[in-house]
Each structure stands twice: as structure tokens, then as C-alpha cells.
Image (tube, rainbow, N blue to C red):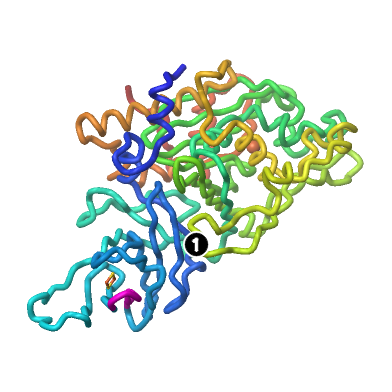
Amino acid sequence: MITAEENQQLSRVGKGTLMGNFFRQFWMPVCMSSELKADGDPVRLMILGEKLVAFRDTEGRVGVFDHRCPHRCASLFFGRNEMGGIRCAYHGWKFDVTGKCLDQPNLEDKSKYPAGTPAIAYRVKESGGLVFAYMGERQDNPPELPDIEAIMGDGDDRNIALTHRDCNYMQALEGDIDTSHLGFLHVGGIDGEKLDLSDPEVFTITEKAPKINVTVTKYGTMYSAQRNAYEGTEHHRFASYLFPIWVTYPGGELDSAVTANAWVPIDDESTMIFNIDLRRASGGGKKPFKYKDGTPVGGLARPLEYLPTTTDWKGRWRPVKDRSNDYGIDREWQRNGDSYTGVVGVPLQDQMIQESMGAIVDREMEHLAASDRMVILTRRVMLDAAKEYAATGKLPDFVDHPEYARDARGGDIVVPYGTDWLDGYEEKMAEVKGYKPKMAAAE
Ligand code: FES
Ligand SMILES: [Fe+2]
């Protein structure tokens, strides 16, 4: 469906590449706010293939820099974070969080260098417990953060989990919009006959071949997976892709689930997943599926265990179970049918599959089917938008209309049989939000 050349364009994210240039025009989450302590150790981050250093100054402000000192390119990671700035360990030049040079103590005649030499510093914002960097062209006039519900607010009221994954961002993101795998990879070991049907989400287990509806939206794309539900009703499971790397995935019922994943490219072959879930932290929480006899279905949402954090560019949030130990696969458990995979928990199951495709999947080898309509549409929308930016400099309107993101939620609804999928979504969102969104983008 896409050519080898387009596969390269979709996958490569470094400076100067098609997608890399496009992505830089949007805010990217780079770490959790809690990872940076005032006057604490600088942290190495790699984003879009760029080696960065992040630190929080004495007043709590955050700096995100190219890690190389502008004097002679020593890494500022080894610098001293002290008294309102970071001081390079080589000759002592000091920079505040905006990159402004505050001191050049090795220069005899300081009057010759009154303004100093700035470090390459990116624009930074904090919201929802996350640090965001803007690496794009509008450093003097950056856009606003997108109004994604899960990243608004102070961050204390949500669960945030980061995970390093050793594969290209796009095959990982595609896992989030490839809805039919749910019934196999994650819940294929559950006997649907025995399930308590009072939770409408069980239809994602009992009906393995949903109809996929897709549309282009003002912020990207959205789908519903449509299934027959209770007598005279249908179940829809919605999710949206938002430029450039966001998915509001279905995390429960549409009126209460507030979730998002950001699939942030570390470089071409590794990804940092930012998983944010507001609803779970706000009390209710997704209840485990139950069998008719009341016993809960176990093993689905087991949290990951992480290796100790290192200061390496890729040393944060790495799971203990990985390809080196085959993700802890238990073949007997897989054989006896209790588990489809023999691997514990949704995140690790996804990791196993996505990394197994290779660092960058060769999409010429694929044979896509009707179940892949959302994946096909989203690739196309991303490539078209990036190509338009490269050719004309025009970005999607969403960049300067952050409010478009307010209409994007993931989740489940049950509607009377025959209800149009977008009408069903818009009506439910009108109940939640007090206004009725219009989801399909005008042609
Ligand atoms: S290289 Fe940083 S002060 Fe000289
Ligand atoms: Fe998955």
C-alpha cells in the first residue's frame, strides 16, 4: 500500500527528514516533571534522534538543550546545575534555562562578549505532570499545547507510565490503532462463553471480527470497531490519532475514560511511550472482566517491572522482560490455552509483537486487509500532511487550533442497532461535553 520510499519517509525522524521536519513543528512530551529536580542532576534525553540534556533550575524552571556546549561542544550533561543555570564543566560558561549565557569566566576581556553565546535551547512547557519541548521553527512564537484532555491540569490526578520500546515509533503507534488484535493477542485466552456480559466491553472479546469505520478529522483520524451487542444494539469502540504522535485509545466507557498515549521517537529504532490515564486515577478505574460466577479474569493489566534507571541516552524506563529473555514467555501457559501468548500483561504483549517485526518494519512485506483500514488511512494522512509541509510550508490547522483535540476521546458505547457510528459518538460526546462536536473533516 505504501512504497519502500514512503516507508523510509514515514519511519525516519532525524533532522532534515520528511517526518522529522514535520514532527518538530509540534510539542513533544520529553519526560515526566518528576524526573527533574530543582538544582538536581541533568538528565540525558534523546528525542527525534537529537541528544539533549534537561535540567530544572533553582527556581523550578526547566531547560531542554542540545547537549553540546556552544563554546567547544563539551557535553553539558557533565555540567553543574547551580544557582539558576547550568555551568559547563570544561571552561565554566554558564547558561540559564532559555539558553542565555550568564557567565564566561575564562575570558580575560568580558566586555568583548557582553551578550555571551547562547546554548541551543528549545521552548519548554509543563502540563499534566509532563515536560514538553518544542523543537520547531517558531521558537519565538510557538503554538499552544494541544488541548488533549489527558495532558491538561496539574498532573496529580492521573497515572502516567513511561516505557522504552526497541522499535520504530510508527509500528508501535500502529499497535494502538490496530483494534482487531485485542481479541487475540491480549484476550484470546479468555473463554467468551463464560463471561459476565454486564460490562459492554466484553463484546470486544466475544466478537473477534469487528467492522472498522474510519474518517479523517480536523486533528488526524478516528475509527470505530463496530460489533453486535445486546438484543437490538451495537457496540462501538472508538479511538483517535492526533498529529503528530498521539492516540486517545479506548480505556473504558466513552463518558468516563480519559486516556492518551504519545509514541515519541527516541531515534529511528526506539520509542518512548507516554501512557496517561486520568480515569483510573480519579477513582473508578477499569474493573477487571468477570466470569458469570463472579470470579475476575486475571493477568491483563499487570504493571511492568523496570530495570534500574541509568544515565544513558536510552537508560530510562526499560522493562526487565525484553527480547533478551523472550519477554518471559511461558509456553505451557500458552499451550494450555489460558493465555494466548504465554506473556503476562498487555504492555509486554504489545512490546513482544512490535519488536518482533524488526527495528523498522519492512512494510513491503505486508498484506493488509479490511481490518487494517485505520492503519492505512492514518499512514496516508501523516504522509500527505508531512509532504504538504515540505512542499508548501503549510501545517495542519490543528497546530494553531489546539481546541480541536478536545473532541478526541477513546472509549466504548452501546447504541440502538443501525445508529450511524459518528452520530453515536457525537451524541455521547454532547452529553459529556455540553456541545456536539462535528467529527468528520470537511473534504
Ligand atoms: S566547552 Fe563549555 S565552556 Fe568551553
Ligand atoms: Fe495491544
Whether residue 90 is visible, yes or no, is yes
Say if 99 sits above or below 253 in the image.
below
Callout 1 secondary element: strand
State the image quarter where residue 11 is shown.
top left
86 magenta-colored: yes
Left or right: where 362 falls relative to 292: left
Q: What residue is shown at x 44% (from left), y 58% (from top)?
A: 45
Whether residue 434 is visible, yes or no, is no
Residue closest to the far left: 112
Disc 1 marks which residue?
32
139 magenta-colored: no
Q: What residue is shown at x 35% (from left), y 76% (from top)?
A: 89
Where residue 18 appears, as percent x and y from the top left, is 32, 34
In this view of the protein, which residue sits in the foreground, 96 or 409? Answer: 96
> Looking at the magenta stretch, what is its main secondary structure?
loop
Q: Amino acid at mark 1?
A: Met
Q: What residue is shown at x 53% (from left), y 22% (from top)?
A: 213
Left or right: where 102 falls relative to 379: left
Badge 1: how crowded within 10 Å, few (<14), some, or many (20+)?
Answer: some
State the image quarter where residue 202 is shown.
top right
Say if 136 sits above or below 436 in the image.
below
Residues drawn in magenta = 85-91
Where ligand 2 lies, by image quadrant?
top right
Where residue 49 appears, as percent x and y from the top left, is 40, 47
- Quadrant occupied by the C terminus: top left
Say if 5 sits above or below 77 in the image.
above
In this view of the protein, which residue sits in the foreground, 124 or 6? Answer: 6
Where residue 295 appears, as percent x and y from the top left, is 88, 46
Where residue 284 appears, as percent x and y from the top left, is 68, 55
In this view of the protein, which residue sits in the foreground, 313 or 385? Answer: 313
